[in-house]
Image: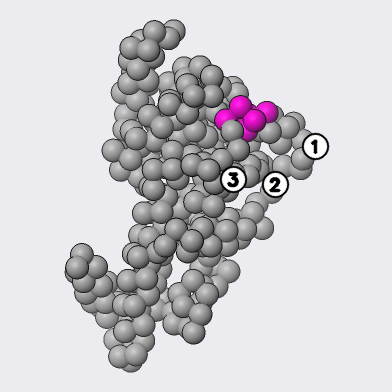
Amino acid sequence: MKMRPILLSLSVAVLVSGCQNMDSNGLLASGAEVFQAYTLSDAQVKELSDKSCAELDSKASIAPASSEYAQRLNKIAAALGDNINGMPVNYKVYVTKDVNAFAMANGCIRVYSGLMDMMNDNEVEAVIGHEMGHVALGHVKKGMQVALGTNAARVAAASAGGMIGSLSQSQLGDLGEKLVNAQFSQRQESEADDYSYDLLRKRGINPIGLATSFEKLAKGEEGRQSSMLDDHPASAERAQHIRDRMTADGLK
Protein backbone atom coordinates (compact mmCIF):
# COMPACT_ATOMS: atom_id res chain seq x y z
CA MET A 1 0.00 0.00 0.00
CA LYS A 2 2.81 2.44 0.79
CA MET A 3 4.30 1.97 -2.66
CA ARG A 4 1.35 3.56 -4.51
CA PRO A 5 2.05 7.21 -3.55
CA ILE A 6 5.72 6.72 -4.38
CA LEU A 7 4.91 5.29 -7.81
CA LEU A 8 2.43 8.06 -8.55
CA SER A 9 4.76 10.89 -7.54
CA LEU A 10 7.71 9.46 -9.44
CA SER A 11 5.60 8.86 -12.55
CA VAL A 12 4.44 12.48 -12.44
CA ALA A 13 8.05 13.58 -12.00
CA VAL A 14 9.00 11.72 -15.17
CA LEU A 15 6.29 13.52 -17.12
CA VAL A 16 7.29 17.00 -16.00
CA SER A 17 11.04 16.50 -16.47
CA GLY A 18 11.16 16.45 -20.24
CA CYS A 19 9.59 13.05 -21.00
CA GLN A 20 6.24 14.32 -22.31
CA ASN A 21 6.67 12.26 -25.48
CA MET A 22 7.18 8.98 -23.65
CA ASP A 23 4.63 6.40 -24.71
CA SER A 24 2.35 4.74 -22.17
CA ASN A 25 4.35 1.51 -22.24
CA GLY A 26 7.53 3.39 -21.34
CA LEU A 27 5.81 5.19 -18.48
CA LEU A 28 4.38 1.95 -17.14
CA ALA A 29 7.80 0.35 -17.39
CA SER A 30 9.28 3.22 -15.43
CA GLY A 31 6.65 2.87 -12.71
CA ALA A 32 7.20 -0.87 -12.53
CA GLU A 33 10.94 -0.39 -12.18
CA VAL A 34 10.55 2.17 -9.42
CA PHE A 35 8.34 -0.33 -7.61
CA GLN A 36 10.99 -3.00 -8.14
CA ALA A 37 13.63 -0.70 -6.71
CA TYR A 38 11.67 -0.22 -3.49
CA THR A 39 10.98 -3.95 -3.13
CA LEU A 40 14.49 -5.27 -3.75
CA SER A 41 15.24 -8.61 -2.13
CA ASP A 42 18.45 -9.17 -0.20
CA ALA A 43 19.72 -11.30 -3.10
CA GLN A 44 19.04 -8.46 -5.58
CA VAL A 45 20.74 -5.94 -3.31
CA LYS A 46 23.80 -8.20 -3.15
CA GLU A 47 23.81 -8.61 -6.94
CA LEU A 48 23.66 -4.86 -7.47
CA SER A 49 26.36 -4.34 -4.85
CA ASP A 50 28.60 -6.89 -6.62
CA LYS A 51 28.22 -5.05 -9.92
CA SER A 52 28.51 -1.53 -8.49
CA CYS A 53 31.57 -2.36 -6.42
CA ALA A 54 33.25 -4.04 -9.41
CA GLU A 55 32.58 -0.95 -11.51
CA LEU A 56 34.05 1.35 -8.84
CA ASP A 57 37.07 -0.93 -8.48
CA SER A 58 37.67 -0.82 -12.23
CA LYS A 59 38.03 2.97 -12.07
CA ALA A 60 40.05 3.17 -8.86
CA SER A 61 43.77 2.94 -8.21
CA ILE A 62 43.92 -0.08 -5.91
CA ALA A 63 46.90 -0.54 -3.60
CA PRO A 64 48.78 -3.74 -4.52
CA ALA A 65 48.94 -6.56 -1.97
CA SER A 66 52.63 -5.84 -1.37
CA SER A 67 52.02 -2.19 -0.47
CA GLU A 68 52.22 -0.77 3.04
CA TYR A 69 48.58 0.31 2.78
CA ALA A 70 47.29 -3.15 1.88
CA GLN A 71 49.38 -4.88 4.54
CA ARG A 72 48.23 -2.43 7.16
CA LEU A 73 44.58 -2.89 6.16
CA ASN A 74 44.99 -6.68 6.30
CA LYS A 75 46.13 -6.32 9.91
CA ILE A 76 43.16 -4.11 10.73
CA ALA A 77 40.76 -6.48 8.95
CA ALA A 78 42.07 -9.43 10.96
CA ALA A 79 41.27 -7.54 14.16
CA LEU A 80 37.73 -6.72 13.03
CA GLY A 81 36.76 -10.14 11.73
CA ASP A 82 35.89 -11.50 8.32
CA ASN A 83 32.12 -11.08 8.15
CA ILE A 84 29.11 -8.81 8.64
CA ASN A 85 26.26 -10.76 10.17
CA GLY A 86 27.78 -13.93 8.72
CA MET A 87 28.39 -12.45 5.24
CA PRO A 88 32.05 -12.68 4.13
CA VAL A 89 33.79 -9.34 3.62
CA ASN A 90 36.65 -8.30 1.37
CA TYR A 91 38.90 -5.29 1.85
CA LYS A 92 40.82 -3.09 -0.58
CA VAL A 93 42.56 0.27 -0.39
CA TYR A 94 41.82 3.00 -2.91
CA VAL A 95 44.95 5.10 -3.39
CA THR A 96 43.66 8.66 -3.29
CA LYS A 97 44.06 11.76 -1.16
CA ASP A 98 40.31 11.73 -0.45
CA VAL A 99 39.33 10.94 3.13
CA ASN A 100 36.62 8.29 3.02
CA ALA A 101 35.63 4.66 3.49
CA PHE A 102 32.55 2.68 2.55
CA ALA A 103 30.97 -0.75 2.84
CA MET A 104 28.38 -2.33 0.54
CA ALA A 105 25.78 -4.98 1.12
CA ASN A 106 27.92 -7.66 -0.55
CA GLY A 107 30.76 -7.30 1.97
CA CYS A 108 32.76 -4.95 -0.26
CA ILE A 109 34.76 -2.70 2.10
CA ARG A 110 36.95 -0.01 0.62
CA VAL A 111 39.21 2.34 2.59
CA TYR A 112 40.83 5.41 1.03
CA SER A 113 44.55 5.91 1.59
CA GLY A 114 43.85 9.54 2.54
CA LEU A 115 41.91 8.34 5.55
CA MET A 116 44.64 5.87 6.49
CA ASP A 117 47.21 8.67 6.31
CA MET A 118 45.10 10.74 8.69
CA MET A 119 44.32 8.08 11.27
CA ASN A 120 46.00 5.47 13.44
CA ASP A 121 44.97 1.82 13.28
CA ASN A 122 42.49 2.11 16.16
CA GLU A 123 40.72 4.99 14.43
CA VAL A 124 40.61 3.22 11.07
CA GLU A 125 39.12 0.19 12.84
CA ALA A 126 36.44 2.41 14.35
CA VAL A 127 35.55 4.03 11.01
CA ILE A 128 35.33 0.66 9.27
CA GLY A 129 33.18 -0.65 12.12
CA HIS A 130 30.85 2.30 11.58
CA GLU A 131 30.57 1.58 7.85
CA MET A 132 29.95 -2.10 8.59
CA GLY A 133 27.16 -0.97 10.89
CA HIS A 134 25.38 0.78 8.03
CA VAL A 135 25.33 -2.56 6.20
CA ALA A 136 24.40 -4.74 9.17
CA LEU A 137 21.56 -2.43 10.21
CA GLY A 138 20.02 -2.22 6.73
CA HIS A 139 20.88 1.42 6.08
CA VAL A 140 22.81 0.64 2.89
CA LYS A 141 19.93 -1.41 1.49
CA LYS A 142 17.54 1.49 2.04
CA GLY A 143 20.03 3.85 0.43
CA MET A 144 20.28 1.59 -2.60
CA GLN A 145 16.49 1.46 -2.93
CA VAL A 146 16.31 5.25 -2.97
CA ALA A 147 19.23 5.64 -5.39
CA LEU A 148 17.97 2.95 -7.75
CA GLY A 149 14.39 4.24 -7.60
CA THR A 150 15.58 7.69 -8.64
CA ASN A 151 17.69 6.19 -11.41
CA ALA A 152 14.78 4.10 -12.69
CA ALA A 153 12.51 7.12 -12.83
CA ARG A 154 15.12 9.07 -14.74
CA VAL A 155 16.11 6.56 -17.39
CA ALA A 156 12.88 4.52 -17.59
CA ALA A 157 14.93 1.53 -18.72
CA ALA A 158 12.99 -1.62 -19.60
CA SER A 159 14.26 -5.02 -20.68
CA ALA A 160 13.37 -8.68 -20.54
CA GLY A 161 16.02 -9.11 -17.88
CA GLY A 162 14.34 -6.59 -15.57
CA MET A 163 15.75 -3.37 -14.21
CA ILE A 164 18.90 -4.87 -12.74
CA GLY A 165 19.81 -6.57 -15.98
CA SER A 166 19.15 -3.39 -17.98
CA LEU A 167 21.53 -1.10 -16.09
CA SER A 168 24.56 -0.01 -18.08
CA GLN A 169 28.10 0.14 -16.73
CA SER A 170 27.83 3.90 -16.34
CA GLN A 171 24.54 3.56 -14.48
CA LEU A 172 26.08 0.94 -12.18
CA GLY A 173 28.98 3.30 -11.56
CA ASP A 174 26.56 6.13 -10.85
CA LEU A 175 24.68 3.92 -8.42
CA GLY A 176 27.93 3.03 -6.68
CA GLU A 177 28.92 6.68 -6.38
CA LYS A 178 25.54 7.50 -4.86
CA LEU A 179 26.01 4.74 -2.28
CA VAL A 180 29.55 5.90 -1.44
CA ASN A 181 28.27 9.45 -0.91
CA ALA A 182 24.97 8.47 0.69
CA GLN A 183 23.58 10.85 3.29
CA PHE A 184 22.28 8.84 6.22
CA SER A 185 19.93 10.26 8.82
CA GLN A 186 21.16 11.37 12.22
CA ARG A 187 19.46 8.35 13.77
CA GLN A 188 21.17 5.98 11.33
CA GLU A 189 24.55 7.59 11.99
CA SER A 190 24.07 7.22 15.74
CA GLU A 191 23.03 3.59 15.31
CA ALA A 192 26.13 2.90 13.22
CA ASP A 193 28.29 4.58 15.89
CA ASP A 194 26.86 2.28 18.54
CA TYR A 195 27.29 -0.74 16.26
CA SER A 196 30.96 0.13 15.84
CA TYR A 197 31.39 0.59 19.58
CA ASP A 198 29.83 -2.81 20.30
CA LEU A 199 31.86 -4.50 17.55
CA LEU A 200 35.11 -3.04 18.86
CA ARG A 201 34.30 -4.18 22.39
CA LYS A 202 33.39 -7.64 21.13
CA ARG A 203 36.70 -7.90 19.27
CA GLY A 204 38.69 -6.71 22.30
CA ILE A 205 39.56 -3.35 20.71
CA ASN A 206 39.60 -0.11 22.69
CA PRO A 207 36.70 2.01 21.35
CA ILE A 208 38.42 5.32 22.10
CA GLY A 209 39.43 5.51 18.43
CA LEU A 210 35.76 6.00 17.61
CA ALA A 211 35.76 9.27 19.55
CA THR A 212 39.10 10.56 18.31
CA SER A 213 38.29 9.68 14.69
CA PHE A 214 35.29 12.02 14.81
CA GLU A 215 37.52 14.87 15.92
CA LYS A 216 40.05 14.23 13.17
CA LEU A 217 37.37 13.95 10.50
CA ALA A 218 35.79 17.20 11.63
CA LYS A 219 38.86 19.40 11.53
CA GLY A 220 41.11 17.37 9.24
CA GLU A 221 44.86 17.38 9.24
CA GLU A 222 47.21 19.36 7.02
CA GLY A 223 44.29 21.51 5.91
CA ARG A 224 42.32 18.64 4.42
CA GLN A 225 38.57 18.55 4.98
CA SER A 226 36.44 15.43 4.88
CA SER A 227 32.99 15.05 3.31
CA MET A 228 32.27 12.08 5.55
CA LEU A 229 30.61 14.31 8.13
CA ASP A 230 28.14 16.01 5.79
CA ASP A 231 24.76 16.12 7.57
CA HIS A 232 26.09 13.87 10.32
CA PRO A 233 25.43 14.53 14.01
CA ALA A 234 27.88 17.04 15.54
CA SER A 235 31.26 15.36 15.95
CA ALA A 236 31.69 16.68 19.51
CA GLU A 237 28.37 15.13 20.52
CA ARG A 238 29.31 11.83 18.91
CA ALA A 239 32.67 11.76 20.61
CA GLN A 240 31.08 12.57 23.98
CA HIS A 241 28.50 9.82 23.52
CA ILE A 242 31.28 7.27 23.02
CA ARG A 243 33.17 8.56 26.04
CA ASP A 244 29.99 8.36 28.13
CA ARG A 245 29.54 4.74 27.07
CA MET A 246 33.14 4.01 27.94
CA THR A 247 32.71 5.55 31.39
CA ALA A 248 29.57 3.49 31.98
CA ASP A 249 31.50 0.38 30.95
CA GLY A 250 34.42 1.23 33.24
CA LEU A 251 36.80 1.95 30.37
CA LYS A 252 39.36 4.72 30.01
| Callout 3 secondary element | strand
Q: Which of 226 and 112 is in front in this view?
A: 112
Q: Nearer the viewer, residue 236 or 139?
A: 139
The residue identified by callout 3 is 88
Measuring from the top left, give residue 191's x and y in whole percent.
Answer: 34, 35
The residue identified by callout 1 is 66
Q: Quadrant of residue 198?
A: top left
Q: Which of 7 and 224 is in front in this view?
A: 7
Of labels 3 and 2, earlier in sequence is 2
Which corner quadrant holds the C terminus? Answer: top left
| Callout 1 secondary element | loop
Q: What residue type is labelled 1?
A: Ser
Residue in the picture at 38% in, 60% down: 145
- Residue lying farthest to the front in this orientation: 86
**Rendered position, 154 above or below 229:** below
Would you say 112 lies left or right of 196 here? Answer: right
Q: Are dots 3 and 1 in contact, CB under 8 Å? A: no
Residue 174 visible in the displayed image: no
Residue 22 among magenta residues: no
Q: How far apart are marks 3 and 1 (CA)?
A: 22 Å
The residue identified by callout 2 is 62
The magenta stretch is 75-80
What predominant SS class does the magenta segment belong to? helix
How busy is the neighbourhood of tag 3: few (under 14 within 10 Å), some, or many (20 plus)?
Answer: few
Would you say 78 lies left or right of 235 here? Answer: right
Residue in the picture at 42% in, 62% down: 41
